[in-house]
Structures are given as C-alpha cells and as structure tokens.
Amino acid sequence: MAPSDERTGWRARLTSPTATALFALCFVLLIGLIFSGDGAFYKWSTHRDALRQASVYGILACGMTFVIITAGIDLSVGSVLALVAVAFSILSIHKDWSPWLTIPACVAIGAACGATSGAVIAKLRIQPFIVTLAMMVFARGLAKTISGGMKVSTAMQRPDGSWTAAPVPDIFKAIDSRLLGDNISVVSLIFIACIIVSWIILARLRWGRYLYAIGGNEEAARLSGVPVVAMKILAYSLAGAFSAVAGLCQAAQEQQGDPEAGIGYELTAIAIVVIGGTNLMGGRGGIGLTLLGTLTIGYLDKILSVNAVPEASRLMLTGVIIIVAVLLQRRKD
C-alpha cells in the first residue's frame, strides 16, 4: 500500500462515526475526572445512577434510531411515553390487572401509536415532522383525557369522597428495584435488553437491511423490491413500542402515571442518536452508536449535576452539542 493510501485509510478510520462517538465519550469522562464534584465522580454509585437516569432516554433513542435510519423523525415519543405511563398506572393500580396482561397491552398501545404515524407517512406521503407532531399533540391530549388531567397515583378517592392509599403494585417495585447488591438497576438491564433486540433487528435480520436501503435511497429501494410502506410502518411501530417500554419504566420509577411526563424527551432522544453518529439524512448509523450517545449524554448530565450546574445551562450546552454533532456529520459527508 502506498504511503498516501495508508494515510487516507487512517484518516478515514479516525473520522469514522464510531471513532468520533468514542472520542466524545472519552472527552466527557475526562471532564468528569477533572471536575469530579468533590470526588463524587470517583464513586461507583455515581456511575450506577448515571446509567439508571440515562436508561429511559436510551430506550427512547433505540426506537428513534430505526426511524432516523430511514431518514425520518419521530417527535411523538415523549407523549407516547406519558400515555403509556398513565395507562400502565390505571391498569396496575386502579384496575389491579395482572402484569402479564398490563405490559403487553401497554406495549401494544405504544406500537399502535407508532404504526398509525408510520401508515400516514408511508401511504399518504406526508412529512414525518408534521405527522409525528400531530401524534405528539394527540397522545398528550389522550393521556390528559384518560387521567382527568391528574397524576394517576396510589391515592384513590372512595365513592363517599374520602381518600385511601392503594398499595404500590409489585410490578412497579420489580422494575424500580436493583440487583447484584444494589449495584445495577432493573431499568438499566431493560435498556441493555432493548439495545440487544435493536442490534439483532438492524444487524442480523432482513428488516434491518431494508431500513438502511430506504434511508439510503427510497426510490432505489422500492425499485429493488423492498416493501417500503411496510418497512416504514415497522420503523415507527418499533419507535412506539420502545416508547411504551420507556413509559413503563418511567411510571415504575415515579410510582405514578403523569400525563405531563416525557416533555422534551424526544429532543434528548434525537440528541443521543445524532451525537452517537447516526446520520440524520438516513442510511447510515447503528445501535452501537446510539449506546455510545446514551453514555455520553448520560455522563454529561450527571457531571453537570454533581457540579451543581443549573438545569438551564445544561439545556443550553446540550443544544450547542447537537449543533456541533450535526456540523461534524455534514463535514464528513
């Protein structure tokens, strides 16, 4: 190999999405080592809590990855999370349904919301931004309607007007528990399971190849025999299903269903996917990059938190990071 070709190869590897995402994560960890919050960053509990707090966002980002790979976007994931959290709380606390019925029903609600968005986008050829914005508003309104505009908690009103406290469902306790000597939370394990399922779909199944083909060139994919409409519906259905899983985790951690939950979560999920290196134009990316993006955002938020940085400053910094990540993608393109 000629020296110039070797230099070009090394340059390509150093500027690959994986290398860029790893550099971003290492840079954030270095900041944590320097600004440790009086040593808090050196404690295992800080890392455990950082992963736990980032897990709900990471689960949403798994679903968002499928959509962005097809060159789409889903702004409704936060509202679907709230809808499922409310439904999960009503069925588990007020109706006393079995988890074996409640969990599949809630995941089906999320998948149905995603499938509806995907069908409108694919069949009616309406921009994903518009369709998912409409679903965002609709799902939020539905969550407020079925909850009466109130948080669905263990506090229940009797027919005579008095109040009583229902027991916290065992499924809530199980999801919100920790294992291995309180060293890892169940929510984090659920996130890892979502990563594995997503990787199998994208890397090992024909569906994954179809999604990449649609994002690369939709018309060419259609002419090649790819079922574009079905695959787009699948992508948004998966985003809705993962939003439902995140909603189950959110409700269990808060021990209530809040119709206002998940506001702005869609932006964090998009930021995770973009910072990880999945291309917003579609056709390139992967769930491994989303995992790196989740860790980067999770650690960044935790480092800022232990150093008592105000939330407003954290939000502004996240916005700047998103712009930088997009500019880096455009430069590589």
Image (cartoon, rainbow, N blue to C red):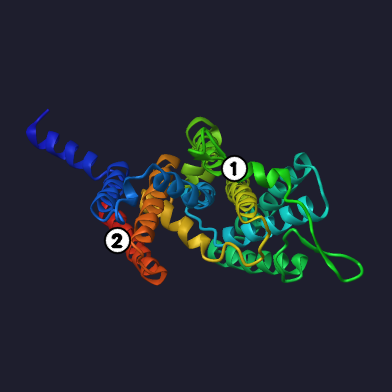
**Left or right side of 305 for 72:** right
**Left or right side of 9 for 292:** right
- Most distant residue in the right direction: 160
Q: Is residue 217 visible from the viewing direction of this image?
A: no
Q: Is 274 placed above or below 288 here?
A: below
- Most distant residue in the top direction: 1
Q: Earlier in the sequence, mark 2 or mark 1?
A: 1
Q: Is residue 267 visible from the viewing direction of this image?
A: yes
44, 136: nearer the viewer: 44
At mark 2, the secondary structure is helix
State the image coordinates of residue 153 (x, y, percent, origin top left). 72, 60
Q: Spatial distance from mark 2 to mark 1, Cα to Cα?
A: 37 Å
Circle 2: residue type: Val
State the image coordinates of residue 256 (x, y, percent, origin top left). 68, 58
Q: Is 24 placed above or below 73 here?
A: above
90, 283: nearer the viewer: 90
> What number is the disc on residue 316?
none
Q: Which residue is mark 1?
A: 177
Quadrant into which the N terminus falls: top left
**Image point (73%, 47%), residue name:** 169
Q: Residues within 10 Å of mark 1 (few under 14, many from 20)?
A: some
> What number is the disc on residue 324?
2
